Image (cartoon, rainbow, N blue to C red):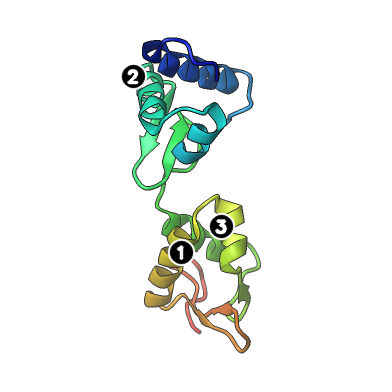
Amino acid sequence: MPQGSPRGTYLEVSESLRDKIRDGEITEALPSQSALVTEYGVSRSTVERALAVLKADGVIESVQGAGWFVTGTGDRRPLVERVTDLLRGEGVKVGDRFPTEKELCERFGASRTAVRSAIAQMEGQGLIGKGAGRGREVLMLPAGRETQTA
């Protein structure tokens, strides 16, 4: 990003992001603040000011612990709820292999830390547990399913 006046740099970043949203380059989640700092070659405070402008205009919204999203897009439920929905899918039964941390990170665009927290909560509820190998398996189906036994 060319360095014009320091006062206007955040406006240039916000306009660039607004254009990317309008053109469909960003459709749901915005890149992390760290990625934006690198992409635009500006400080974190400049990125924060640019995001604040877009938020004030109603273009984006912040989701605690998840990042910035284009307003009106995506599933804002906690990650554990979205991962638990995998067990509500057609054909899922007790004893099935549960996806790895890496697979869940890719599928939900979440950090390994967030995925581990969701897995720990599901293990605490008795939904999943260690399988015969190194992976995890379905021990019980969540409420709302016909079969509840392990």
- Residue 17 in view: yes
Q: Name the residue under label 2.
A: 56
For the N terminus, give its image quadrant: top right
Q: Mark 1 points at which residue?
A: 144
**Observer-nearest residue: 118 or 149?**
118
User: Where is residue 8, by image quadrant?
Assistant: top left
- Residue 29 in view: no
Query: How many angstroms separate mark 2 from mark 3 (CA)?
Result: 30 Å
- Name the secondary structure under disc 3: helix
Q: Are marks 2 and 3 in contact (CB under 8 Å)?
A: no
- Decide: is 134 above or below 4: below
Residue type at mark 2: give it: Ala
Q: How crowded is mark 2: few (under 14 residues within 10 Å), some or many (20 or more)?
A: few
**Residue at the spot x=60%, y=63% of the render?**
102
- Name the secondary structure under disc 1: loop
Residue type at mark 1: give it: Gly
**Residue at the spot x=35%, y=29% of the render?**
45
Q: Which of marks 2 and 3 is nearer the N terminus?
A: 2
Which circle marks residue 114 in the picture? none
**Observer-nearest residue: 39 or 147?**
39
Residue type at mark 3: give it: Cys
Q: Residues within 10 Å of mark 3 (few under 14, many from 20)?
A: some
Q: How crowded is mark 1: few (under 14 residues within 10 Å), some or many (20 or more)?
A: few
Q: Name the residue under label 3.
A: 105
